[in-house]
Structure formats: C-alpha cells, structure tokens
Amino acid sequence: MHDLSRIKHTLLVTKVMSARQAAALIHDGMVVGASGFTRSGDSKAVLAALAEKAECDHTRITLMTGASLGQGTDGVLATAGAIVMRLPFQSDPVMRTVINQGGLSYIDENLSETAAHIRNGFLPPIDIAIIEAAYIEADGSIVPTTSVGNSAIFVQQARQVIVEINEAVPASVRGIHDVFLPEDPTGRAILPITEVWQRIGQDVISCNPDKISAIVFTNQKDSPAETTADNAVATAIAGHLLHFFESEIAAGRLTRALRPIQAGIGKIADAVLSGLAQGDFEHLTMYSEVLQDSTFRLIDSGKMDFASGSSMTLSEGCYRRVFADFEHYRHKILLRPQDITNAAEIIQRLGIIAINTALECDIYGNVNSSHISGSHIVNGIGGSADFAQNSYLSIFVTESITKGGKISRIVPMVTHVDHSEHDVDVIVTEQGLADLRGLSPRQKAQAILSRCVHPDYQPELDSYFERACLRGGHTPHLLEEAFQFYTNLAETGAMKTRILESV
C-alpha cells in the first residue's frame, strides 16, 4: 500500500495512478520537463514507462531536465526512439552514441541558461513537467527530494504536472531546499546572497493543484555515484593544488577558510576535496552544483561549515549514512535551482574558487571539456563555463596523458573550445601546476609546457611552440601542424606513432 499521507491535498488522492497510465498523458510532439540533476531526484517510473509506450506507438518528445538522469533512463529513451530533442545535459553512453550518430538533436548549453531560455520563449513551451517529490503539501506545493535543478521553472511553465512521490526518500527532507525563481531580466532585483548559507526563497516548489494531472508512487533510491579507488594521478593533482592554496595563503590572497569552493564531479575533484580534509584549513564553505561524498567527508571532519548546491549525488554508502543521521546534516546544506547556484552575479559576489575537469587543454590555456577530436560529444559543458567565467579563481584539472600514453591531454590547439584562455587561471596535471594569471600568451605556453606536459610529449610540444614563435604572432601557431596529433590518432590509434609501437 502507498503512503497516501504524503498527499496532503486530499482531493489530489484521486489523481494516483500507475506509471503507465501517467505516461499515456504524454503525446507525440510534446515538450517534457523532468526533474533530475546529476542522477539524483529524477523520474524513476514515468519516463521509463514512456520508453515502453514509444516502442509501441512511436511517441517522440523534446526532453528537458536539470542535468543528467539516473537509472539508465536516457539510454532507454534513446534506444526506444522516444527523444527528438534533448537538453541541456546528459551523460548516458547509449544516448551519447545516438547523438553522435545524428539520431537525435542535442542542445548542449550552460546550465545557468535553460530556465531563462524557457522564461523568455527561446525554447518551446513545456507541455508536461514530471517532478520527483517527497510529498505534496495541502496547497499543492511540491517538496523536492535530492535535487532542485530546473524543477521549479518546469512546474511554473508547464500546462500539466505529473508528480512522482518517492517513498524511499524520508519526508524529513523538507527544509533543505531554497527555491527561488528570478524575475524577468527587465528590472530584475538583486539576488541577495552574500553568504553561502543565506536563504532567499521557500522550501517547496509552488504548484497550482489544478495543474497536477497524475501522481505516481515509487520507492527507489537515486542511482549511486560511481566510486573510485585510490588514484595516484588524482592524488598528485590534488597535492599540487593544495600546495598552490598554501602559497596563496602565504601571499595573503587567501585565508585558511579559502573562499567558497565549486567542484565538478569526478575522481580528480573528489581527490582535491578529500585532500582539503587533511590540510590545515578551517571553516570551509561550498557554493557548487553537486554535493558529493567528499562534501560530506569535509563536513564530518569539521573542516566544512556549510555547503550549497543543486543536488546531492552520493555513493550508496554515503547516501545511507547521510539519511541515517539526517538531522546532523540538514542545517549544513541547501539545495537550490540551478539558475541560482550558477548565477554569474552570485558567483562573482562570493568570489568562488572553481575546480573543473578538462578533456584537453592547449598550450595557451584554452580548454575543451566536451568533445573528442572536435566532433564527438562526451557529456556536455554543464555548468563549468558559468563558474569559469565568473569565479575568483578558475582552475582546470586533467591527467597529462590517457589510454596508456596514446593520447596527450595537452595539445598544440584544442579541437573544440568550451573555455577560452581568457577564463582559465590555473591548469593542473599530475606533472605540475601552471598559474596563468598575469601572463601573456607566450608566457602561458612556457608555463604549461614546463609544468603540465607528460615527458613523452615534451619534445614535440616544445618543438611546435619554438617553431611557431619563429613564424611570429601574438599567439603563435603552425596551422598546418596544429592538429597533427589528431591526424596521428585517427590513422594509428595514438597521437604519437612511437607511443603506439612501444605500448
């Protein structure tokens, strides 16, 4: 039996139905906005039922979310041919393949922009919102679960709302959300966040109960975040970055509390955050998109006072620990809409230290975070540009080589630019750290070449730069050679032929 006490608006009890019945409300050509941000707080039943429906009747929709979905949902939808357009972010390997094959259209955009694009009519109007909830209040308001993402704007703009009440999430989750919808750009008021713990909204998503057309009960935890074993490369990168923070403290540019931290998801960012727990830091704060295991380890260590994000994306063990002692954490975290977590105004005001992962960097500090060989998307830009462009310190981390040395992460010229040299302050690999602040393009190249490049690629990259400088230019390049690494990779499977032969 379902816990009907989670529907506090008694008339809405008549809207309870199966996921298949709810999916029948979604018709071909509709635009659907679904909750979910980095695999948390996502639809766990209705979208899966929609995939089954699409296999039978060829329903195809435009799907908007906050970010990536869990449960393999994107892949199931892509396989069923249910998606004609997807935005603004996904990370499913099956859907990625379909996108790169041209099987569906994908809009990869900054995560701060989607809500404004919907509000301003740049994107098609939303027909149905599918929102995961802990429960529904007496006035129809929705209590979110482990993410907020774009859920509030979806509910505000949609013609109909389908609510998935997830009984696996305790009702006590109410109180950790700060839901605020900005005004239209003309005459917009200041977003009054000057400290990471400040609330500016309410702890529910307002919803006209007349909009709610279906309620589906589920009982399923979020897909767990992937955990990684100790990684020597990630540990080395973390070591370089922690040493850099120490030098910034010694120079008087940072204190032991640093500044509010933003960190992307991944083993390297996780290693950096975990390293902070071992260092001589205190009263740390976070203003980020995702609160992950390392966030809660820092809280447990006493090093971090407060963390603000848009979702909690946790390993299975950390998820259990957090909800088993939720009262210990509830006053130390906030979850907000992503156009608030990623708002340029707030990022600039708080002076964020942004730590994000690069797919590759070039010798002048341009960063590609989304496309392999310039054409094939991996996941997307996510919110990294929101933070890189507006933070106090914009740091990008990456390993210097991958695939057994067949690929260098430092190249003469990146094949796709997500973050230009103007928005990148620091690049770190396991080889070392290049502080690019206050440097000209040639000086940036010298710093990156001397500190970040793997020894196997040092001669070629040094030679490229030296010969390019002889030709001249403010940012010297040999355009006929700039992409030779990629030509080699396509022809031989390695950026350097001799690397392939020696592996």
Image (cartoon, rainbow, N blue to C red):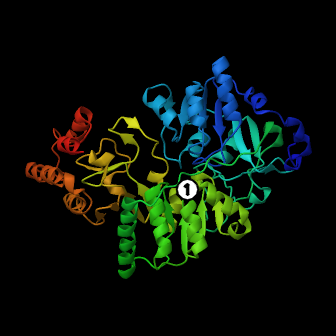
Q: Residue furthest top?
A: 57
Q: Secondary structure at mark 1?
A: loop
Reading the image, the residue beneath label 1 is 289
Q: Position of residue 65 (x, y in %)?
A: 60, 41
* 253 horizontally vs 7: left or right: left
Q: Residue furthest left?
A: 470
Asked if residue 195 shows in the view, the reply is no
Left or right: 399 in relation to 282: left
Is residue 283 at least partly visible in the picture?
A: yes
Q: Quadrant of residue 287?
A: bottom right
Quadrant for residue 12, please give it: top right
Task: Name the residue type under label 1.
Answer: Glu
Q: Nearer the viewer, residue 299 or 349?
A: 299
- Give the side of residue 359 with respect to residue 256, left or right: left
- Percent position of residue 90, x then y: 52, 40
Image coordinates for residue 45, horizontal then vertical, percent: 71, 37
Q: Residue at x 57, y 24 (%)?
A: 81
Say which quarter of the image contains residue 234.
bottom left
Mark 1: give few (<14), some (14-19) or many (20+) Cα within 10 Å. many
Residue 250, compared with residue 442, is above or below; it is below
Instruction: In the rendered view, tell whether residue 248 sits above or below residue 36.
Output: below
Q: Which of 118 and 418 lies nearest the eye of the viewer?
A: 418
Q: Residue at x 55, y 56 (%)?
A: 289
Instruction: Please tell me how many numbered marks the rendered image carries.
Output: 1
Q: For the N terminus, which image quadrant?
A: top right
Q: Front-most of 142 and 117?
A: 142
Find residue 84 and report its horizontal and vertical position in percent: 55, 26
Q: What is the quadrant of the C terminus in the image?
A: top left
* Looking at the image, residue 400 lies above or below residue 66: below
